[in-house]
Image (spheres, grey):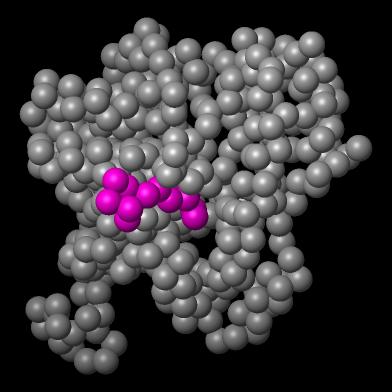
């Protein structure tokens, strides 16, 4: 059996053809494929607007800027996430306040969010993370946000295609803009669709959309209606201190091709998850099952075991390369220097001591998955 990674990208002949066609076109960087990708992505998630950027981290940074994060402001997020979910606040000079997770979902604990806001009147927003692909209940979080005048930036990097149905039987897709002010996605190779590096911001708010377009390209505009003067057809103006966070036409062409297979990939991920669920149902392995009416996107398939390190090493000896997601962000040296410490978030820390991500990607074969399951159960016995 060849080595089995925890995740793997999949490039088809159609993907290669799409990129080659763009290589032969008149545009390699800022061309028509970017806009096409944005429009198709917005349609897929159900949002009004989408802005393609160079990475998921760039998406977080621009979103924080567009939402007005600045020195003196505080923003809440989960410690169980990749560091960028918190770093984006510090990029803008703001302060991160971590909130513990619910042990049943490993998602930000919404009741604890409200407790934090009551003690910190300068909290301006919250960044919930759809960890592993499990959608946060944004209906409940929106109630808290509206009560205290906060914005919501949904980190949907793990949850493309995920959704939930609210108490009024309304379906909310991750990133559709119905409950969050902004949402961000990543197109890193291990995500649902890949562009090498890349990201997307979605929103239903036109004001934020226009702000993001400006910030993405150095703060420069060629919109005549915004000019303070005009010297001719070549003229442009810089209205803000922006960044070069643009995606290229080459990446957008790959993204369009990958997006066409997104539903197929999501279906396969859920099939793989179901097989894992059945296999581990009668074992001592803890698995998180989504609540009724919540539809997991399964970027990751995470189990929790008491002997995580031993299992991790045993799997590696069998050429199964599992992974750990994540080391709690508040325990990183940078954040410990800011005053966070072990013991601050017992649920997150307890989860970290036991979590292990098993192989999960659409091209994982039934035979490979069966080998993974058999190896895990053999070790547990």
Residue 213 on image: x %, y %:
29, 67
Q: Can see residue 61?
A: no
Spot the residue most to the bottom.
232
Q: Name the residue at 53% across, 54% down.
A: 187
Relative height, residue 329 to residue 370 (above, below): above
Q: Quadrant of the C terminus?
A: top right
Q: Position of residue 380 (x, y in %)?
A: 75, 13
Q: Main secondary structure of the magenta part?
A: loop
Q: How many labels sit on residues?
A: 0
Q: Work out whether residue 105 or residue 119 is closer to the camera in this orientation and state it.
A: 105
Q: Is residue 5 left or right of residue 216?
A: right
Tell which residue pokes out farthest to the top in this image: 343
Q: Residue furthest right?
A: 1
Queried whether the magenta region covers residue 167, the answer comes back as yes
Magenta residues, start to end: 159-170
The residue at 32%/55% (across/down) is 170
**Image quadrant containing the N terminus:** top right
264 or 330: nearer the eye?
A: 264
Judge from the rendering whether residue 46 lies leftward or rightward of residue 179; answer left or right: right
Say above or below: 243 vs 113. below
Q: Is residue 204 above or below residue 88?
A: below
Say which quarter of the image contains residue 72. top left
Q: Residue at x 18, y 85 (%)?
A: 224
Q: Position of residue 310 (x, y in %)?
A: 72, 12
Residue 96 place in picture, x, y as percent: 26, 29
Residue located at (71% from left, 61% from top): 11
Which image quadrant is residue 20 in? bottom right
Q: In the rendered image, is residue 28 in sight?
A: yes
Give residue 206's quadrant in the image: bottom left
């Amino acid at each position: 059996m060849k080595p089995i990674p925890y995740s793997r990208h999949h490039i088809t002949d159609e993907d290669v053809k799409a990129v080659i066609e763009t290589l032969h076109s008149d545009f390699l960087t800022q061309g028509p494929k970017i806009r096409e990708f944005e429009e198709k992505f917005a349609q897929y998630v159900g949002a009004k607007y989408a802005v393609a950027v160079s990475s998921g981290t760039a998406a977080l940074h621009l979103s924080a800027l567009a939402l007005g994060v600045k020195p003196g402001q505080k923003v809440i997020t989960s410690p169980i996430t990749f560091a960028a979910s918190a770093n984006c606040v510090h990029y803008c000079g703001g302060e991160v306040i971590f909130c513990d997770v619910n042990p049943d979902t490993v998602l930000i604990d919404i009741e604890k969010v409200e407790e934090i806001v009551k003690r910190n009147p300068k909290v301006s927003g919250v960044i919930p993370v759809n960890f592993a692909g499990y959608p946060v209940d944004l209906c409940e979080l929106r109630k808290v946000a509206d009560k205290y005048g906060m914005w919501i930036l949904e980190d949907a990097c793990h949850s493309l295609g995920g959704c939930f149905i609210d108490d009024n039987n309304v379906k909310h897709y991750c990133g559709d803009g119905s409950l969050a002010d902004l949402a961000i996605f990543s197109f890193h190779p291990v995500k649902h669709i890949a562009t090498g590096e890349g990201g997307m911001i979605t929103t239903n708010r036109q004001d934020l959309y226009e702000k993001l377009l400006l910030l993405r390209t150095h703060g420069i505009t060629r919109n005549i209606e915004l000019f303070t003067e005009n010297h001719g057809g070549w003229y442009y103006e810089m209205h803000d201190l922006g960044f070069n966070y643009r995606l290229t036409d080459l990446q957008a062409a790959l993204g369009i091709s990958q997006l066409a297979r997104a539903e197929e990939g999501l279906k396969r991920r859920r099939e793989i998850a179901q097989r894992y669920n059945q296999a581990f149902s009668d074992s001592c392995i803890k698995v998180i099952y989504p609540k009724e009416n919540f539809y997991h996107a399964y970027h990751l398939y995470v189990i929790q075991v008491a002997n995580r390190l031993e299992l991790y090493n045993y799997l590696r000896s069998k050429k199964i390369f599992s992974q750990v997601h994540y080391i709690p962000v508040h325990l990183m040296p940078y954040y410990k220097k800011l005053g966070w410490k072990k013991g601050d978030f017992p649920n997150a820390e307890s989860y970290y001591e036991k979590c292990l991500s098993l192989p999960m990607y659409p091209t994982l074969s039934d035979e490979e998955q069966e080998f993974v399951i058999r190896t895990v159960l053999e070790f547990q016995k």
